[in-house]
Image (spheres, rainbow, N blue to C red):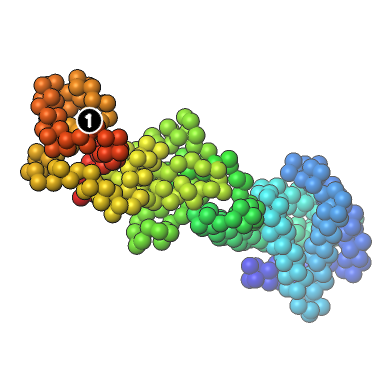
Amino acid sequence: MEDSEHGVAREVALLDLDAVTMELLGAAVTAVADEAVDSIIREVPGYTGALSGRMGQVIRGAVQLALGNFLKVARSADGSDPSTPIAQSTAAAYDLGRGEARSGRSMNALLAAYRIGARVCWRGLSDVAVAADVSAATLGRFAELVFAYIDELSAASVAGHGDELATTGRARERYLRELTDLLVAGSEQRVLFAAAERAGWIPPGTLTAVLLPEGQVSAVLRHLDPRALRLSGDLPGVGGDADLAALLVPDTHGVDRVRLMQLLSRRGATVGPERPWPEVAVSYDRARNARGLPRTSDGEPVDTDGRLVELVLGADHQAYRDLRTAALAPLADLKPQVRRRLEETLRSWLLHHGRRQMVADDLFVHAQTVRYRMGQLRELFGDLLDDPQSVLLLTLALAVADGTRHD
């Protein structure tokens, strides 16, 4: 930008404008600036009512400064450095662009304001120049330089707007990451509320934690509520699996949870329970603990809401192994194939409350086969099959269909 600033300054310095004309132009600056601002308010929807009061005064002052600096450059034929006033104006324009970004407005309105301002300023200044009998050649060069000057200012504003968006965008990303870390860590509510406010994040009613491979995140994220939070890299409690990411998904109750499961199909995902948003650490921890559970069908996500028994029984793997060993001790000396068959039969018998035909249908065998196997089991377990405490232990030991994986 610096080279173009000097270029405009050098060209303006070549204008053949006498002192009287310069005085007339200077005297017109305030009126021209006011007319430019009034036209912007009328013609640019984004500024309707926005330039009233103190803000309007600031903008009017900025326009006056820009015009005044332009005329200072035009006086620089006396040998003074013409780049100084242009640098002042472009710096002000840069700050204006940053301010527009902070206010949440796009550059469309500001660029429209520059176009309208250039038109109005040229009309006002050219009227003065024509009345002062400025030659046609000088007037033409004057027009070119007015619009080149406005182009410099608008370019500076665009740069300021872009820089501010980049800066605030990076800051917000950092704040969102900090919020996500605090949520997963189960921080206090007052800390979470403060972090949410700092990040400009409007909390949903609930959040659900989803663990899935990093490569699947982008494809999923674009279909979720914009408030969904993402955590990548070294996930807490997961170890060195750098390929795993976590999503905290807003409001997934009812049909929305069904849709989420459909979206996560065949993506290797594990889904925690829905929890009030400050309590999503519970959902994250459960999803993390469920990563090792077998998938009930090919490609379907692990839904922890449907796997609570396995999660409870697997909370202390060694305790569960000891329970199984003690409860199933009468089967310890059998051949593995016979043991698996009798465990399968006993599990179904317990779950179906001893209804022989239902057990047979469950195992796809004849009712007489069930009778025979239960005879074997009664010989092995004796009165234990009629003891409530023993039946409870056996039910827990065989609660998971593939419980033998714990042995």
98 and 13: which is toward the camera: 98
Q: Is mark 1 on a helix, strand or loop?
A: helix
Tell me if residue 165 can be seen.
no
Which image quarter holds the N terminus? Answer: bottom right
Question: Viewed as shown, does residue 104 lie left or right of 243?
Answer: right
Dot 1 alpha-carbon crowd within 10 angstroms: few under 14, some 14 to 19, many 20 or more: many
Question: Viewed as shown, does residue 362 lie left or right of 264?
Answer: left
Q: Give x and y (percent) for residue 187.
A: 56, 56
Which residue is the extreme one toward the front? 383
Residue placed at 28% from the left, 54% from the top?
Answer: 318
Residue placed at 68% from the left, 72% from the top?
Answer: 6
Q: Give x and y (percent) for residue 260.
A: 43, 37
Image mark count: 1
Please tell me in which quadrant of the rendered image residue 72 appears: bottom right
Residue placed at 10% from the left, 21% from the top?
Answer: 368
Image position of 266 with respect to 143: above or below: above
Tell me if residue 30 can be seen.
yes
Question: Viewed as shown, does residue 22 lie left or right of 303?
Answer: right
Q: Mark 1 points at which residue?
A: 348
What's the residue type where badge 1 is placed?
Answer: Ser
Which residue is the extreme one toward the left? 335
Image position of 105 with respect to 225: above or below: below
Q: Give x and y (percent) for residue 92.
A: 75, 64
328 and 216: which is toward the camera: 328
Q: Give x and y (percent) for residue 153.
A: 71, 60
Please tell me in which quadrant of the rendered image residue 131 appears: bottom right
263 and 218: which is toward the camera: 263
